[in-house]
Image (cartoon, grey):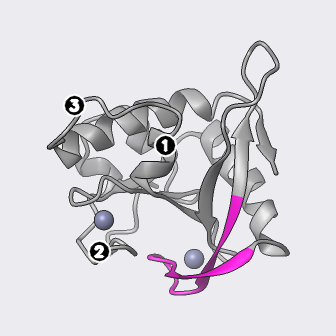
């Protein structure tokens, strides 16, 4: 059930988001990830996720947004609800926590928005200055897939 055949737009710059099935990597399909070729941001949606493991992970993350979180001026690209922001860390194999990153989540439909800059805190840009958003988005999708295998800690 990848995608819903509707167009979704980047909540930051209004660009048409690239649906998971039109992306270069399997990671996008597994997580139901749409990405923006303008800002390299990424939108995850639990219903669009092909992998049950990934959908479960996203639904777990969603619990952190249904009652809590700070409302932000960002509309959910799937359902137009006001999104909320929270900080998360991932627990590495050695037990240490990664640097916290901010994730915007929809309190209604289990969608999440990740700015490229947030993931870059955990992994530096692959192609430095003048980076190409599509290549950057692919690199970030790989980072994200590795991270989401780890326990996620709500801060
Ligand atoms: Zn964008
Ligand atoms: Zn939503």
Observer-nearest of 46 and 107: 107
Q: Residue 6: percent from the left, percent from the top?
A: 33, 75
Q: Residue 125: percent from the left, percent from the top?
A: 33, 34
What residue is pinned by disc 3?
Answer: 127
For marks 3 and 2, give the CA distance: 22 Å
Determine if the C-beta at disc 2 is less than 8 A from ligand 1. Answer: yes
Report the magenta residues as a range.
70-86
Q: Residues within 10 Å of mark 2 (few under 14, many from 20)?
A: few
Q: Residue at x 70, y 28 (%)?
A: 150
23 displayed left or right of 123: left
Q: Residue at x 80, y 42 (%)?
A: 153
Point out the quarter of the image occupied by ligand 2. Answer: bottom right
Q: Earlier in the sequence, mark 2 or mark 1?
A: 2
Q: Earlier in the sequence, mark 1 or mark 3?
A: 1
Determine if the C-beta at disc 3 is less than 8 A from ligand 1. Answer: no
Please tell me in which quadrant of the rendered image residue 59 appears: bottom right
Please tell me in which quadrant of the rendered image residue 36 appears: bottom left
Badge 1 marks a residue whose secondary structure is: helix
Q: Earlier in the sequence, mark 3 or mark 2?
A: 2
The label shown at residue 42 is none
- Main SS class of the magenta portion in the image: strand
Determine if the C-beta at disc 1 is less than 8 A from ligand 1. Answer: no
Front position among marks 3 and 2 = 3
Q: Residue 55: percent from the left, percent from the top?
A: 63, 48
Badge 2 marks a residue whose secondary structure is: loop
Badge 3 marks a residue whose secondary structure is: loop
Q: Is residue 130 above or below residue 103?
A: above
The label shown at residue 119 is 1
The label shown at residue 13 is 2
106 displayed left or right of 113: right
Q: Are marks 1 and 3 in contact (CB under 8 Å)?
A: no
């Amino acid at each position: 059930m990848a995608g819903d055949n509707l167009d979704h737009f980047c909540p930051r710059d209004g660009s048409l988001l690239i649906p998971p099935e039109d992306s270069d990597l399997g990671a996008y399909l597994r997580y139901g990830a749409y990405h923006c070729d303008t800002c390299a941001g990424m939108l995850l949606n639990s219903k669009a996720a092909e992998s049950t493991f990934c959908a479960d992970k996203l639904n777990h993350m969603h619990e952190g947004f249904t009652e809590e979180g700070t409302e932000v001026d960002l509309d959910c690209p799937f359902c137009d609800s006001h999104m909320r922001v929270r900080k998360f860390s991932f627990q590495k194999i050695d037990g240490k926590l990664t640097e916290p990153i901010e994730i915007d989540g929809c309190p209604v439909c289990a969608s999440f928005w990740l700015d490229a800059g947030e993931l870059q805190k955990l992994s530096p840009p692959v192609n430095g200055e003048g980076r190409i958003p599509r290549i950057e988005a692919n690199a970030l999708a790989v980072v994200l897939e590795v991270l989401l295998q780890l326990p996620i800690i709500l801060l």
